[in-house]
Amino acid sequence: MPAAEIITIGTEILLGEIVDTNSAWLARELRNLNVDVFRTSTVGDNTNRIAEVIRETLQRADIIITTGGLGPTVDDPTREAVALAFGVSTIYLPELWDQIVERMQRFGRFPTENQKRQAYIPMGAIPIKNPVGTAPAFIVENGSKCVISLPGVPREMEYLAENEVFPYLRTRYYLNGLIKARILHTAGMGESVIDEHIGEFEKLANPTVGLAAHYGVVDIRITAKAASEEEADSLIAQVETAIRQKLGNVIYGVNDETLESVVLRALHSFGYTLTVVEIGTGGELSRRLSSSNNGAFLGGQILPALAKDQSFAETVSAQKNTTGASIALGVAVTPATGASEAEFFLITHHAQFAEKRGYGGHPKNVAAWGVNSALDWLRSRVNG
């Protein structure tokens, strides 16, 4: 199986002016092709530094994909950098220039002289015409290895990858398998405790199992390599079943399911409606519930602090009475360095519940942690 690395090119990424989404998209798609991505990197718009990174990467990877730096301006140096890395010059291809001219004339414009730079590629490279933009791409082969340079504009990059690059990779590297992942979402149990329960599975070679902790939730990733999707599903299912036996209701969803959507689905199935009061969260809970609303969420009250003449319980009770909701949930967070706190209050048809929890993470994360904890707290009581 070939190994790949992704190099994103652009000083604007290093300056934090834009976020690199190309690497994540390429990594997911290469996974589906059964290509291992072992490393991603970013380098600024400097010809020598780009060439140096490419030469270094060629020592490790079979497939190198670069994105960015193929525009018409002086600070688009990828063509020259790739040529430098291979010790060749760039050459002008009239057919690429014709394609650029034709595309721009289609929109009533004529390219400027500096756009001719885009018709140059490293000598010996395989040109890739770009029907959705003005920056042609190219592939440089080096024995069993290759460097593929794509535009940085995400939609252009994705189109050329899907229609030109991935078919090329399938043929060149005889790619007929895939890598498939399934994410199990958990709440109510810390990462270290989960690790104690399922550590044996984290030692597997195929599928592999890994943990990723967030704020009050932990993801379990099961990744299988197989010749077919059916085989991958079977491998994943065996491990998932065993993990579910270990963790039970700690697992609340899979893949794209969110904690809020799972809670709202449970409420809807029982015919319950929900209102909330949140203090100190900046409206995080209401936003998330609104984005997944299936009719069970009746809205909420967002407060910076409690009124001096009213308790937390009284505030939540008043909100329930005002909206007529079946259930009212209150969450109040108090950020503090090393000692943040969250308070929960719940009123159902027949009971009231209250709880306080401490949080030792960064104060800026206490709202996300508090909301996740409150949703899981509600989930356990709705389903219990």
Image (cartoon, rainbow, N blue to C red):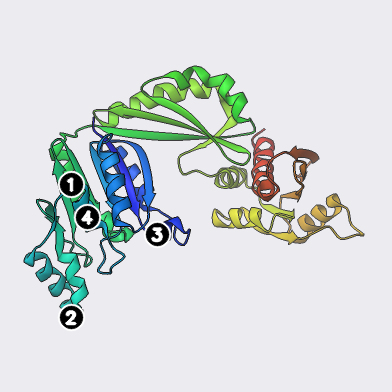
Query: Label 4 to label 3, Cα distance in Å?
Result: 23 Å
Taking the image as drawn, is residue 351 in sight? no
Q: Name the residue under label 1.
A: 86
Q: Nearer the viewer, mark 1 or mark 3?
A: 1
Q: Which of marks 4 and 3 is in front?
A: 3
Query: Label 3 to label 2, Cα distance in Å?
Result: 28 Å
Judging depth in this view, the residue of 62 and 56 nearest the camera is: 56
Q: Which of marks 4 and 3 is nearer the N terminus?
A: 3
Q: Earlier in the sequence, mark 2 or mark 1?
A: 1
Q: In this view, does 100 lie to the left or right of 378?
A: left
Q: Which of marks 4 and 2 is nearer the N terminus?
A: 2
Q: Mark 2 points at which residue?
A: 110
Q: Mark 4 points at which residue?
A: 160
Q: Residues within 10 Å of mark 2 (few under 14, many from 20)?
A: some
Name the disc covering residue 11, or none.
3
Q: Are marks 3 and 2 in contact (CB under 8 Å)?
A: no
Q: Are marks 4 and 3 in contact (CB under 8 Å)?
A: no
Q: Quadrant of the N terminus?
A: top left
Residue 215: x, y in percent? 62, 41
Residue 360: x, y in percent? 72, 38
Tell me the kind of residue under disc 3: Thr
In the image, residue 24 above or below residue 195: below
Q: How crowded is mark 4: few (under 14 residues within 10 Å), some or many (20 or more)?
A: many
Judging depth in this view, the residue of 132 and 275 nearest the camera is: 132
Q: Do the residues labelled 4 and 1 touch (CB within 8 Å)?
A: no
Q: Quadrant of the C terminus?
A: top right
Q: Earlier in the sequence, mark 4 or mark 1?
A: 1
- Mark 3 element type: helix
- Mark 4 element type: helix
Residue drawn at (50%, 43%) of the image: 257
